[in-house]
Every structure is written in structure tokens, then in C-alpha cells.
Image (cartoon, helix red, strand yellow):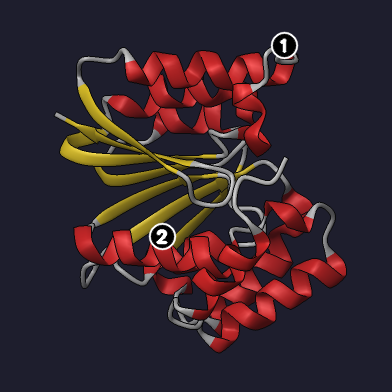
Amino acid sequence: MEIINKKIDAYIDAHTDIEPEVLKILNRETHLKVLLPRMLSGHFQGRVLSMISKMIKPHRILELGTYTGYSAICLSEGLAEEGKLTTIDINAELEPFVRSFFEKAKVDHKIEYIIGDGTQVVPELNELFDLVFIDADKKNNGTYYDLVFDKVKPGGFILIDNVLWSGKVIDENPDKDTKVILAFNEKVQNDERVENVMLPIRDGVLLVRKR
């Protein structure tokens, strides 16, 4: 199901700042060499992530789900001086590819890249974050949300990707995977500890502010 008309999508892209050259190359290399390139944030969403990060000017960012590093590079653009981004992914096979692009983007000194299971790594992190981006295995969105919540500063933000699930969230008879997304969306909607707004960006981004 198409959520946004392709012509509107093209118009939006044309009226959004161009991505840095290193991200254009990363986008192309991901599509040529890596499975499931649709998982890449891409131009428009990447510029949104960059803009949000620049608005917040975070000192500490946590990302769950590195994939090929595109979103991490975008988020790092808004880091405060001396800021750090910690990104976690379970796929060790992509590590050399990802690290090479962190170096090409000249952000490797700002990024702590951890290979491991986020549900096991996050509890071991002993710091508070200004911004968290959750873009890992969707069945664990609720688990990740609960794990990171106490590690987010009051007034800090959590972003969760793919909350529209290709538009399936409005299906009359949702499948098993869609029901997981629906349950998570309701969980956040009913969480009185936060303010939230759902953004129809690509596959849907839920923007959450901790009170």
C-alpha cells in the first residue's frame, strides 16, 4: 500500500536539502551490495533525522539498529561538540562496510559502534541519552522502549521507525506482524509519561518526548 503519492514524494525530495555526497555513495553501495536495501533511511528521512538532531543538539544519542550506518551518520550531524552516538546492531557481517563509511563521513571518532543483541547491550549502558532512535527488529519495539526509557533524560526524545508498517496498520484484518506494531503504537499512545506525535514520514516515525 502506498502511503504517499509518488509524485508528492518526488516533490518532497526535490524541496529537501540534498544529502551529503558520502551519503549518496552509501545509499548507492547499500543498494548494490547489501540485502534488503529498503531498510535504509534514505534521503528524505535522513534529512529529517539530521534536522531533529540539530534542533535538539544532543550530547548523547543511542541508536538501535545500525544497518549500513546511514541514519547514524545523519543523526551525528546534530551532535553537540564532544557529543557521542552509540549505535547497536546484531549483524557482524556488515561491520567492515559500516566502519568504512563512518570513516569516510569523518564521524568515526563520534560513534561507538557495538555489535550485539540490543536487549542484552542496553541494560549494560551506564549513561543518559538526549535522543534515542529505535529501528531494529520490530517485534521487540516494546522491549526496547521499556529498556531505554529510564536511560532517557527528562525532556529527551525517542524516535521509533516503521510505525505505519507499509500502511497495514489500518487493515481491517491485520496479520500477526501488524498486530505487534499496533500493540506498540497503543502502548505509547497510552503512556502518560510521554508526549507523542506520529509523523507520516516514509513508513512512519513516532516522535516521543519524555515528560
Q: Nearest the camera: 16 or 136? A: 16
Q: Amino acid at mark 1?
A: Asn
Q: In the rendering, which numbered label is found on residue 173? A: 1
Q: Which residue is depicted at the point 55% across and 33% down?
A: 118
Of 113 and 174, which appears nearest the observer?
A: 174
Measured as percent of width and height from the top left, residue 38 is found at: 73, 54
* SS state under label 2: helix
Mark 1 is surrounded, within 10 Å at the Cα level, by few (under 14), some (14 to 19) or many (20 or more) other residues, namely few
Q: Residue at 43% of width from left, 15% of height from top?
A: 186
Quick one: quadrant of the N terminus? top right
Q: How many marks?
A: 2
- Mark linked to residue 21: none
In this orientation, does residue 4 appear?
Answer: yes
Residue at x 21%, y 58% (from the top left corner): 56
Mark 2 or 1: the one toward you: 1
Is 9 in front, or is 190?
9
The answer to whether marks 2 and 1 mark residues whose Cβ atoms lie closer than 8 Å is no
Left or right: 27 in relation to 54: right
Please tell me whether mark 1 sits on a helix, a strand or a loop.
loop
Q: Is residue 19 left or right of residue 95?
A: left
Rendered location of residue 81, percent (x, y): 21, 73
Q: Is residue 59 above or below residue 173?
A: below
Tag 2 residue:
49
In the image, residue 132 above or below residue 38: above
Q: CA distance from mark 2 to mark 1?
A: 32 Å
Front residue (pair 146, 48) = 48
